[in-house]
């Protein structure tokens, strides 16, 4: 069941200089004054209120001044890859002599700084004098202890929610840790290390480190921060919108890393017209494919190279991996759908849905959980088989249900079943004893039933009202395209309206291509507009024409063979 509601508008908004549609769109997202649209770097939050920053900077100053070996321990997703690349580029530009990285292969080591990974790090040819974690570490209690036992201090930078106990690290920089006054709790891991590098540059400048030279321009790394912010699906608060917009401006101006440029080009996208959705649907998935199916080292090297030819070769390899990932995902989704079809109605599905198949791929279960969550609109955890009787799980939630808190309750009711877990409100990862799967399914469902109302299980589509016929035009579509940046917590504008369905056909096996005629006062007879609905089930779609439909859609631009025209990206359709 889908409920369509119009976004509410706050009182007292003053955006008179903008077109009426943009006024309404911005106001519905909490922008009440035009000053909130000034996405300038000078409006960025200062770094000074980040807890632990002084100790962290002191450790890195020592690394540079004493020419010590720094080892960056990253994560195998886009945020981890961009964070790793950013630290390496920034540290080298500020004079660090030895900066290496180590990213755990998810199939051999799992997530984060584990004792097993510390053992690998301690045996590297250049044994680290300091380990710096990026996008992980806040839950690495045993990993940090293992590093200390080897005589290696650890600097933790992370953004994930901490547990009850913090690791015994030399320093921790994480806006989500207790007593941290940094205003934006929505920072991704790459943003945290970007701020750390800004603070380090300021300290080195005060120490005269750059005398006779110029301090590096760290703004050149904002394309990495922007990519991570969108791909990690963190809320686009004002600070994050500044970071994303500034990164996009660099890409559109041709001032981006050759790796990001190559990843866009291999997908057929023009970097000169880059928008935030390109990070989430084009660049991000190709980088993630390396960490899901192989080793994230390929993605990191693509972001580190300055050689355009190397970048193109690596981007092509990443594109190939992404194609493989799509095939694996399609097979897994079919398996999951067969399980769902065993229930008589959607209402008979568990509220907390747990899925498992012995042949599923560990690297793709997160995407699977997300796909199924979108279909059934309830929290979903997908498991794949790991080693030694352990299942690896990835979960996705719905608005109003904090998934990590749910897992904490499950853990209290089933002590010892969950070997480890962590994450956010909307996404989490975990390891589970396979023998406990059946009882976990029951307890997870029960906890979700206690936490979720029936209203929350109704998918709600928020819309920005209707568009007049004359507003279904290229100029407004172009304005909306660049009016963001759009993303999590600052969603792309969505509209509703009535149309006559003139033509329809399936393209690409699973996309519905439509020709529509607006139904509204003042509509010119015979006026037509294209629409497309991606990833539908063709068997569920009746082949009927010349009937009225209610659409929920985004106003988009279709570019084909040099011709640009308006098209509607359909999110929901009801036949009247």
Image (cartoon, rainbow, N blue to C red):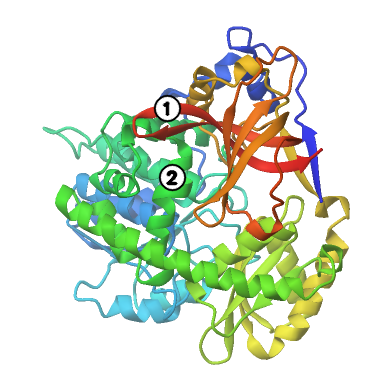
Cα–Cα gap, marks 1 and 2: 22 Å
**Would you identify the image quadrant in which residue 203 lies?**
top left
Seen as rendered, the residue at the extreme left is 212
- Where residue 198 appears, as percent x and y from the top left, is 35, 39
Above or below for 27 versus 123: above
Categorize mark 2 by other alpha carbons within 10 Å: few (<14), some (14-19), many (20+).
Answer: many
**463 horizontally vs 77: left or right:** right
- Where residue 333 appears, as percent x and y from the top left, is 59, 68
Above or below for 514 versus 337: above
Residue under circle 2? Answer: 279
Does residue 62 appear in the picture of this structure?
A: no
* 1 and 2 marks in contact (CB < 8 Å): no
181 or 361, nearer to the observer: 361
- Where residue 200 appears, as percent x and y from the top left, is 33, 43
449 or 93, nearer to the observer: 449
Residue at x 17%, y 32% (from the top left corner) = 214
Above or below for 9 versus 244: above
**271 horizontally vs 338: left or right:** left
Does residue 188 appear in the picture of this structure?
A: yes
Residue under circle 1? Answer: 564
171 or 332, nearer to the observer: 332
| SS under mark 2 | helix
Residue at x 26%, y 32% (from the top left corner) = 254
């Amino acid at each position: 069941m889908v409920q369509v509601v119009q976004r509410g508008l706050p009182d007292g908004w003053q955006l008179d200089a903008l077109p009426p549609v943009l006024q309404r769109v911005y106001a519905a997202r909490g922008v009440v004054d035009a000053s909130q649209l000034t996405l300038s770097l000078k409006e960025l939050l200062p770094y000074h209120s980040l807890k632990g920053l002084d100790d962290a900077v002191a450790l890195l100053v020592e690394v540079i001044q004493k020419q010590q070996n720094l080892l960056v321990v990253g994560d195998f997703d886009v945020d981890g890859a961009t964070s790793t690349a950013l630290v390496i580029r920034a540290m080298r530009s500020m004079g660090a002599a030895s900066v290496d990285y180590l990213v755990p292969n998810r199939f051999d080591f799992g997530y984060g700084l584990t004792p097993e990974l510390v053992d690998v790090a301690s045996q590297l040819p250049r044994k680290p004098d300091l380990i710096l974690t990026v996008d992980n570490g806040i839950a690495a209690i045993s990993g940090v202890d293992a590093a200390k036992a080897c005589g290696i201090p650890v600097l933790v930078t992370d953004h994930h929610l901490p547990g009850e106990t913090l690791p015994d690290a030399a320093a921790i920089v994480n806006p989500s840790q207790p007593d941290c006054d940094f205003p934006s709790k929505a920072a991704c891991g790459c943003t945290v290390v970007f701020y750390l590098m800004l603070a380090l540059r300021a300290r080195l400048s005060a120490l005269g480190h750059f005398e006779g030279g110029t301090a590096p321009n760290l703004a050149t790394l904002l394309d990495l921060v922007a990519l991570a912010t969108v791909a990690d699906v963190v809320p686009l608060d004002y600070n994050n919108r500044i970071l994303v917009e500034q990164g996009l401006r660099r890409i559109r101006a041709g001032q981006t890393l050759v790796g990001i440029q190559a990843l866009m080009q291999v997908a057929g996208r023009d970097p000169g017209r880059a928008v935030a959705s390109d990070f989430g649907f084009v660049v991000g998935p190709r980088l993630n494919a390396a960490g899901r199916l192989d080793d994230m080292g390929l993605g990191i090297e693509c972001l580190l190279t300055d050689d355009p030819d190397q970048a193109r070769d690596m981007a092509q390899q990443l594109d190939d991996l992404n194609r493989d990932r799509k095939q694996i995902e399609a097979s897994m989704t079919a398996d999951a759908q067969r399980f769902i079809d065993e229930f008589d109605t959607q209402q008979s599905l568990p509220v907390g849905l747990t899925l498992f198949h012995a042949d599923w791929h560990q690297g793709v279960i997160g995407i699977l959980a997300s796909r199924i969550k979108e279909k059934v609109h309830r929290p979903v955890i997908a498991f794949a088989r790991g080693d030694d009787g352990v299942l690896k799980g990835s979960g996705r939630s719905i608005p109003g249900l904090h998934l990590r808190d749910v897992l904490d309750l499950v853990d209290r009711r089933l002590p010892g079943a969950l070997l480890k877990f962590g994450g956010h409100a909307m996404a989490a990862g975990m390891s589970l004893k396979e023998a406990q799967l059946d009882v976990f399914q029951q307890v997870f469902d029960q906890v979700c039933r206690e936490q979720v109302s029936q209203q929350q299980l109704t998918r709600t589509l928020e819309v920005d009202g209707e568009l007049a016929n004359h507003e279904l035009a290229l100029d407004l579509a172009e304005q909306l395209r660049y009016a963001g940046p759009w993303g999590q917590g600052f969603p792309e504008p969505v509209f509703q309206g009535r149309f006559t369905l003139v033509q329809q056909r399936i393209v690409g096996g699973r996309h519905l291509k439509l020709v529509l005629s607006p139904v509204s006062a003042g509509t010119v007879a015979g006026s037509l507009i294209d629409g497309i609905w991606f990833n539908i089930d063709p068997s569920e779609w009746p082949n009927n024409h010349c009937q009225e439909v209610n659409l929920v859609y985004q106003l988009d631009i279709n570019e084909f063979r040099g011709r640009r025209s308006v098209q509607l990206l359909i999110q929901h359709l009801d036949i009247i």
